[in-house]
Amino acid sequence: MYVVGNWKSNKTIHEAIEWWNAFVALVSGDPKIAAAAVKRPVNVVLCVPYTILPALREKVTGVTLPIFLGAQDVSPFPEGAYTGEVSARMVKELADYVIIGHSERRRYFQETDSELEFETLQAQEAGLATIYCVEGEKNRIPGSATVVAYEPPSAIGKGQAEDVGKAGAVCAEIRRSTKKPVLYGGSVNPENAASFLGHPAIDGVLLGGSSLDPSAFFTIIRIASTIP
Ligand code: PGA
């Protein structure tokens, strides 16, 4: 079971530390959650802007609830003369996961399936786990992807999640063909999270807006840790 937060292009370092302090206060106020999440187990991954990774890297080890850090993109190239790019080896110094092929990367930065395959390869060589995003069953999924996230663009950031039955059917199909864990993402919030997390074909959730608020993020982790 995965609960993955994607902060997108939000928060300064200062704001990230404020978020972190509020989140840790919630975790400490609920001593049972760490044990429940470890027992379940719930893999909590927080994917933040590159600039924030060093500050959170220092903090994650000090909390009872295991939390992994992730980046939101990675260069399709190795290190070298690629101005502006952050290589997989650089990300691996600070994080364990990376999101690849998010709908916004495909739409605003014209990332294509073949470029994303190179990103996945670079990430794998560097030892990063990958959360490979697809918009439907039609997208090609690299064999080396660790986890797949189904995120219908019509539900991302819209406040209206996809119908859980429909999302579950797509996730089931992706799981059948890839044999990988499949997450659902798109307007998941504390009110609807249980229905997605409880669906037998859905192995977790990818949260955008709900991860920006420490209390919503914490509530969804708590829901994930109590689902049988
Ligand atoms: P949302 O974003 O939860 O804000 O809809 C999900 C995502 O884009 O990962």
Image: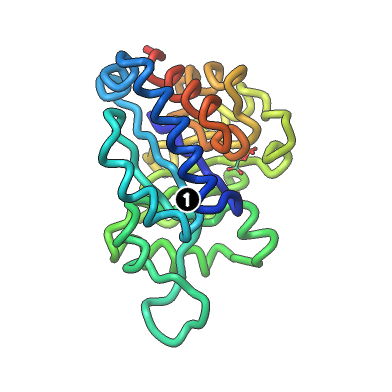
Q: Secondary structure at mark 1?
A: strand
Identify residue for label 1: 132
Identity of the residue drawn at 52% across and 69% down: 115
Residue in the image at 30% along x and 22% along y: 34
Q: How many marks?
A: 1
In the rendered image of this protein, does residue 148 appear above or below residue 33? Answer: below
The picture places residue 158, in percent across and down from the top left corner, at 74, 36
Check the image and report above or below for 66 versus 122: above
Amino acid marked by disc 1:
Tyr
- Write the residue at 60% across / 65% down: 111
The C terminus, quarter of image: top left
Residue that extends furthest to the bottom in the rendered view of this protein: 81
Task: Indicate the position of residue 183 as horizontal and vertical percent values.
Answer: 48, 35
Quarter of the displayed picture in which ligand 1 can be seen: top right
Residue 24 horizontal/vertical position (percent)? 39, 30
* Along the viewing direction, whichever of 104 and 20 lies nearer the viewer: 20
